[in-house]
Image: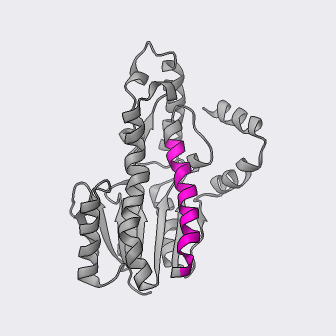
């Protein structure tokens, strides 16, 4: 297996950490970009200070990789966060917070990498979206919206860059047991007991948190991502877990009212 040089965002914990560990174990060199650097026992994992919301930091890291290796074989955009609360209970700044890292962080990272890939004539892109981008989750509407935006964005991107030898893949995990659950933020108004949505928000997000903490392991998700990196031709959409694959295939085919009835029962 040829050693690959890979840039990974959001690699300090959860799914990202599992991806970095697997890739490093296989002999690939992984530059893990995060706000805070960390120490790894595997010398193939290189922690670099990179806030995906900073174009300057992102370009600095990309230039560092090119300076040290002369190429980048793949980029995995995995950095993200979550916000919960009713749409009415979410102000503009909170909406921007949800989109800043999850969407605009991806666009900044890819804008820095695409010229390199195009000049090389090859490159692989994996972007972590979510099953929530296909199945809208009440009281986490903006999280679902940003993940749906990534699905449309990456599919359009794949058409634009195919002629340059660049491949794109969307990773769509379902409920996964990671630190993401504890890190989820709630909108300010959603925490006010006087909100008309307070009880519904609490119940819905509580169900989601239960499912996450009883969900698949981050390692099982990471294996799917690493498999795509190692394939000659990546899949455009990769969904870990048979049940979630079936959900992503079947859900859009159902009548809209029936789809919403199902989601309403679940959340």
Residue 222 at x, y percent in the picture:
47, 63
Q: What's the residue at 31%, 53% (across, down)?
A: 53
Q: Main secondary structure of the magenta part?
A: helix
* Colour scheme shown: one colour
Instruction: Locate the N terminus and report the quarter of the image it occupies.
Output: bottom left
Residue 176 at x, y percent in the picture:
49, 49
Q: What's the residue at 49%, 42% (across, down)?
A: 143
Instruction: Locate the C terminus and report the quarter of the image it occupies.
Output: top right
Magenta span has 154? Answer: yes
Total numbered badges shown on the rendered structure? 0
Front-most of residues 211 and 108:
108
Q: What's the residue at 47%, 69% (across, down)?
A: 125
Residue 52 at x, y percent in the picture:
32, 57
Front-most of residues 59 and 64:
59
Q: Which residues are magenta?
A: 143-163
Quadrant in which residue 35 is drawn: bottom left
Front-most of residues 168 and 16:
168
């Amino acid at each position: 297996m040829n050693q690959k040089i890979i840039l990974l965002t959001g690699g300090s914990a959860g799914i990202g950490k599992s991806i970095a560990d697997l890739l490093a174990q296989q002999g690939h060199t992984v530059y893990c970009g995060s706000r805070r650097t960390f120490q790894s026992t595997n010398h193939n994992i290189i922690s670099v200070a990179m806030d995906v919301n900073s174009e300057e930091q992102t370009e600095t890291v990309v230039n560092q990789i090119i300076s040290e290796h002369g190429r980048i074989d793949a980029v995995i955009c995995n950095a993200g966060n979550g916000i919960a609360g009713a749409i009415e209970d979410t102000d503009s700044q909170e909406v921007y917070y949800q989109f800043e890292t999850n969407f605009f962080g991806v666009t900044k990272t890819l804008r820095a990498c695409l010229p390199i890939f195009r000049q090389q004539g090859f490159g692989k892109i994996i972007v972590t979206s979510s099953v929530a981008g296909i199945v809208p989750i009440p009281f986490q509407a903006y999280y679902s919206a940003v993940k749906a935006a990534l699905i449309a964005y990456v599919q359009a991107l794949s058409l634009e860059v195919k002629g340059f030898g660049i491949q794109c893949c969307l990773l769509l995990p379902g409920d996964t047991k990671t630190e993401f659950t504890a890190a989820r933020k709630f909108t300010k108004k959603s925490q006010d007991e006087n909100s008309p949505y307070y009880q519904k928000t609490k119940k819905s997000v509580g169900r989601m948190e239960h499912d996450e903490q009883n969900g698949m392991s981050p390692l099982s998700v990471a294996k799917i991502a690493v498999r795509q990196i190692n394939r000659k031709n990546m899949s455009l959409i990769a969904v870990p877990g048979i049940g979630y694959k079936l959900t992503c295939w079947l859900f859009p085919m159902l009548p809209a009212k029936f789809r919403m009835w199902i989601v309403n029962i679940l959340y």
